[in-house]
Amino acid sequence: MEPRFVTAADVARRAGVSRSAVSRAFTPGASVAPETRARVLEAAEALGYRVNRLARTLHRDRSDLVGIIGANLGNPYISAQFDALSAALQAEGLQTLLVNLRPDPRPGAEPPDLGRAVERLLEYRVRTVVLLSGAAPDELVRLCAANGVRMVLINRPAPAAGALADVIDSDAAGGGRLAARRLIAAGCRRLAVVLSESRTSAKLARADAFCAEAALGGLTVRRWTQGPNSYETGVAAARSLLEGGAARIDGIFGVTDEIALGAMNTARHELGLAVPHRLSVIGFDDAPISAWSSHRLTTVRQSLPALTGATLEAILCPADAAVSHRAVAVDLVERGSVAPARGSAPG
């Protein structure tokens, strides 16, 4: 006999009640006699029955499932972001359905299909689609709206005007300016910014603002734009940018902590450069790993609690509420990977 889940019909037979009585017994506030409820619960316990919540969502306007689409889930900040958001959703009685858009590393493999990922989530009747990776084409936003599903974009490009998607982003440009000012204040004059080939809107905004702020001080910036958004990209960038000579870089801004850590650790442990005395490094995100005593990376913080709170607010909005654009402020967290500002006492 094929293994199967225990059903409400099984419980009804064992308890000697109707199928509808079982349903009412497990529905908060439903009318059911105390003795009937007791018999149902006793039968359910004996059989190991659990309510089919997926089936229940078919009879409601909105389900308790939230679809989250992400790639590069090994990134320290993205994994911390997913951890915080899924815990917050759980506390609200909502459940998470994760779609991993990690690219297939095999040669010639097709790139991840964001459209199919969204369609798959709609097949599970999710109440909201949260996009952590990729840019949402307008047709996908419209597809969600046509099914009464809100889309939430986190640090993603905003869709066309009138598209039904909530947008949550941190101040990417402000963070880039903070990083440039801090490196300049430390006396750095040969600056570099390291991003990746992905060149997402948020990362580009960080890099562009960094370069623009440096230009105000009469400085030019070398841009490294190769490789994926990864620690290994920071490693490769450090090996290239920090080759010998009088023009060697003395300040690096990594547009993510993961990239910045790759550059900083390579400079220290492979190239023998003292950080921050010979090289200053700043990241962006404030991933938990950045605070480790072995790293102590100075970084532009996009507050994880603030980002999670803003995302949760958007998810909990009524389905017919107007879409919103929520901004998350950033600030600089000093930890020791940048030399003291000129004129200040060493920390």
Image (tube, grey):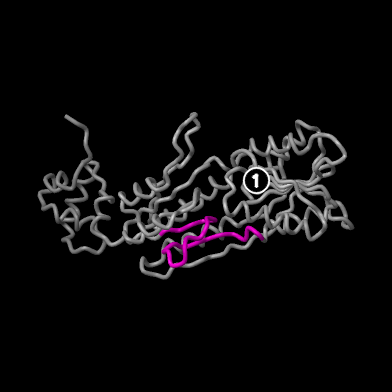
- Report x, y in % for residue 182: 77, 56
Q: Pinpoint residue 187: horizontal percent, then vertical percent.
A: 85, 52
Q: Is residue 153 magenta?
A: yes
- Residue lying at the far right of the rendered structure: 343
Amino acid type, residue under disc 1 in the picture? Leu
Q: Secondary structure at mark 1?
A: loop
Which residue appears farthest toward the bottom when viewing the image?
322
Residue 337: in sight, yes or no? Answer: no
- Horizontally, residue 218 falls left or right of residue 291, namely right
Quarter holding the N terminus is: top left
Q: Residue 263, image x and y in percent?
A: 71, 39
Counting the numbered discs, the total is 1
Specify the quadrant of the image occupied by residue 213.
bottom right
| Residue 48 in picture, x, y percent from top left | 24, 41
Q: Nearer the viewer, residue 37 or 333?
A: 333
Stretch of the chain drawn in magenta: 151-173
**Lateral position of residue 330 relative to residue 240, left or right:** left
**Which residue occupies 86% across, 36% down?**
245
Q: Which residue is mark 1?
A: 195
Q: For the point 42% across and 70% down, which residue is it?
A: 322
Taking the magenta stretch, the answer to whether it contains residue 160 is yes
Q: Residues within 10 Å of mark 1 (few under 14, many from 20)?
A: many
Residue at x 58%, y 47% (from the top left corner): 77
The residue lying toward the viewer, choosing from 162 and 44, is 162
Q: Is residue 311 above or below residue 322?
A: above
| Residue 67 in sight from this viewpoint | yes
Q: Where 240 sits versus 220, above or below?
A: above
